[in-house]
Image (spheres, helix red, strand yellow):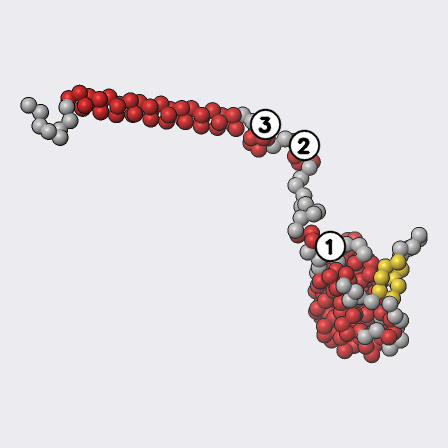
Amino acid sequence: MQKPGCPSSVQLRSRVTGNCDQRTSAGAQIKQRTAVQRSTSTSLTNSPESVTKLHPRPSDKLNPKTINPFGEQSRVPSAFAAIYSKGGIPCRLVHGSVKHRLQWDCPPENLPFDPLLITLAEGLRETKHPYTFVSKEGFRELLLVKGAPEKAVPLLPRLIPVLRAALVHSDDEVFERGLSALVQLSVVVGPSLNDHLKHLLTSLSKRLMDKKFKEPITSALQKLEQHGGSGSLIIIKSKIPTYCSVCC
């Protein structure tokens, strides 16, 4: 006699059969998922994009990846570019049919050298137009004004590190602008530059080994000697022993 509350044999068989059906159904679903995953991975492996990644095309070497010109990095201006855009440089580039020129907001002789001359010197490291022209020409024209020596000499301790940064720059055109600015400064301040020459000659000595810079650097050294006097020759020879004096 069956005890009350206990399942009958029919009920047990029904439960066992139901459990088996559930396990069979679950197993079928797992097999189906596995088959789908294998099919997906196979299609991805055989896709043209994956083949290209595994086996780069020869044309990829001719089309290297470049920085997006509209990316976030290109939108960040340099310090000089930011100052120029805000009107901190009191001159503007005027495009001419033959050559460009600067138009000053007021006569340059009325402008304070501090910090304008230093800011223009910092702009020598720019590599984009119009900043390259504005900094180079602005520096040159500011040193031509009346009273430039008296205004420039007190700024030498702050100008020299900026010029040195241009002279050690990896860009050849930046170096050339720095070298030209150094000669212009030497013409204006004369022997006052001698105390700072040792900080600049090391970079000139390194570039002197490059054939394309040998002539312009030698010419610059000769002008530094001419305007710096006998004291400059001793300093130059101490850093560049192969230099031949213009007095020889």
Q: Secondary structure at mark 1?
A: loop
Of discs 1 and 3, which sits in the foreground? 3
Residue located beneath label 2 in the image: 59
Name the amino acid, label 1. Asp
Q: Secondary structure at mark 3?
A: helix
Between residue 8 and residue 163, name the one nearer to us. 8
Corner quadrant of residue 244: bottom right
Corner quadrant of residue 160: bottom right
Q: x and y percent of residue 101 in the render?
A: 89, 60
Residue at x 93% of width, y 53% of height: 98
The span from disc 1 to disc 2 (Cα, nearest Å) is 29 Å
* Any part of residue 124 in sight: no
Between residue 61 and residue 23, name the one nearer to us. 23
The residue sitting at the left extreme is 1
Name the amino acid, label 3. Pro
Name the amino acid, label 2. Ser
Residue at x 29% of width, y 25% of height: 23
